[in-house]
Image (cartoon, grey):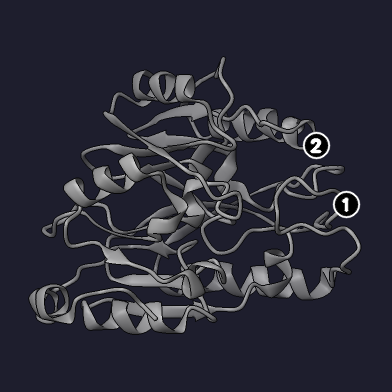
């Protein structure tokens, strides 16, 4: 059940006027998608993947974004990189400045150059990383700051490097549950604060260390706290334009809470990609203005 005090949290949001802002997304088709190795607790190479179904689910996600009026660019997949469909991990881009990825595991390291080349081709200034980081998997951009995860995939040193690369303050958050190995599995940015509304997030407290939970409470006292049940279907691996929240269809109670706060929910089914530990946000890199 979603953990939220309806007396002090839902009422102020029931009349909030949410506003969508057009976004620029980058995706990569799951042409080579498979679960060939295990680098997170979700992955089991003995469980078969339906490649055709994965492609259909991915394409429905792409069309959901297009139907909401957003721009979606598609990067060419690289043979031998089955996880390249998770485009969010390829870098962080804010205001025309990009910070490239440097993957923790050797199985994904060739993705970094492909994404960096793509971003340069878009006319972006890309800073080559010297520290391990996995792009928007662990960097979530708000208008006033970057929320940055560490503990499993991205180093603390990369947080400092990213702050310089995109010229935005970084708030470090420690992940402690290996099921939530990237920040984008434990936090959803609902409103980045770039419009008339303040920044708004949802998160699963159990994914974080005690001091990081305290940081989140202090920065976002009105945040949605999501239950373990919704977190374990990767309900927080969602993408929002400030009004419309595209999220996994199985995150039922989270979706109800979002609607009570004035958001429009757009549920999608990405069950095949979930077998590799990814969902909506993992498949979506945003080039933030």
Asked whether residue 124 is in view, the answer is: no
- Who's the residue at 45% across and 29% down the image? 98
Front position in the image: 62 or 1 = 1
Front position in the image: 68 or 200 = 200
Contact flag, marks 1 and 2 (Cβ < 8 Å): yes
SS class, disc 2: helix
Q: Position of residue 122 (x, y in %)?
A: 51, 35
Q: Which quadrant is the C terminus positioned in?
A: top left
Figure quadrant of residue 42: bottom right
Q: Is residue 127 left or right of residue 160?
A: right
Q: Position of residue 139 (x, y in %)?
A: 43, 39
SS class, disc 1: loop
Q: Tell me the crowding category of disc 2: few under 14, some 14 to 19, or many 20 or more residues within 10 angstroms, Cα based.
A: some
Front position in the image: 26 or 223 = 223
Q: Is residue 180 left or right of residue 9?
A: right
Height in image: 124 above or below 135? above
Identify the disc placed on residue 36: 1
Asked whether residue 281 is in view, the answer is: yes
Figure quadrant of residue 223: bottom left
- Who's the residue at 57% across and 71% down the image? 233
Identify the disc placed on residue 107: 2
Figure quadrant of residue 258: bottom left
First of labels 1, 2 by sequence position = 1
* Real-space Cα separation, disc 1 to disc 2, in angstroms: 10 Å
- Who's the residue at 73% across and 33% down the image? 105
């Amino acid at each position: 059940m979603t953990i939220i005090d309806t007396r002090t949290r839902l009422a102020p949001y029931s009349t909030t006027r949410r506003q969508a802002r057009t976004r620029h997304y980058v995706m990569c088709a799951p042409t080579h998608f498979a679960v060939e190795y295990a680098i997170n607790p979700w992955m089991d190479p003995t469980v078969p993947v339906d490649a055709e179904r994965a492609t259909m689910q991915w394409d429905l996600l792409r069309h959901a974004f297009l139907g909401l009026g957003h721009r979606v660019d598609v990067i060419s997949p690289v043979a031998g990189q089955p996880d390249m469909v998770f485009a969010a991990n390829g870098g962080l881009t804010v205001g025309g400045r990009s910070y490239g990825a440097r993957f923790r595991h050797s199985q994904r390291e060739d993705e970094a150059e492909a994404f960096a080349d793509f971003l340069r081709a878009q006319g972006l200034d890309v800073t080559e990383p010297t520290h391990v980081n996995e792009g928007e998997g662990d960097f979530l951009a708000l208008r006033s700051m970057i929320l940055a995860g560490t503990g499993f995939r991205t180093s603390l040193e990369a947080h400092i490097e990213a702050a310089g690369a995109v010229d935005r303050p970084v708030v470090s958050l420690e992940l402690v549950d290996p099921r939530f190995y990237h920040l984008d599995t434990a936090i959803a940015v609902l409103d980045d604060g770039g419009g008339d509304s303040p920044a708004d997030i949802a998160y699963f407290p159990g994914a974080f260390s005690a001091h990081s939970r305290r940081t989140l409470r202090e920065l976002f006292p009105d945040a949605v706290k999501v239950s373990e049940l919704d977190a374990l279907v990767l309900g927080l691996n969602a993408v929002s334009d400030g009004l419309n929240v595209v999220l996994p269809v199985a995150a039922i109670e989270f979706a109800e809470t979002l609607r009570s706060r004035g958001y429009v929910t757009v549920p999608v089914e990405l069950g095949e990609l979930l077998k590799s530990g990814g969902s909506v946000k993992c498949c979506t890199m945003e080039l933030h203005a």
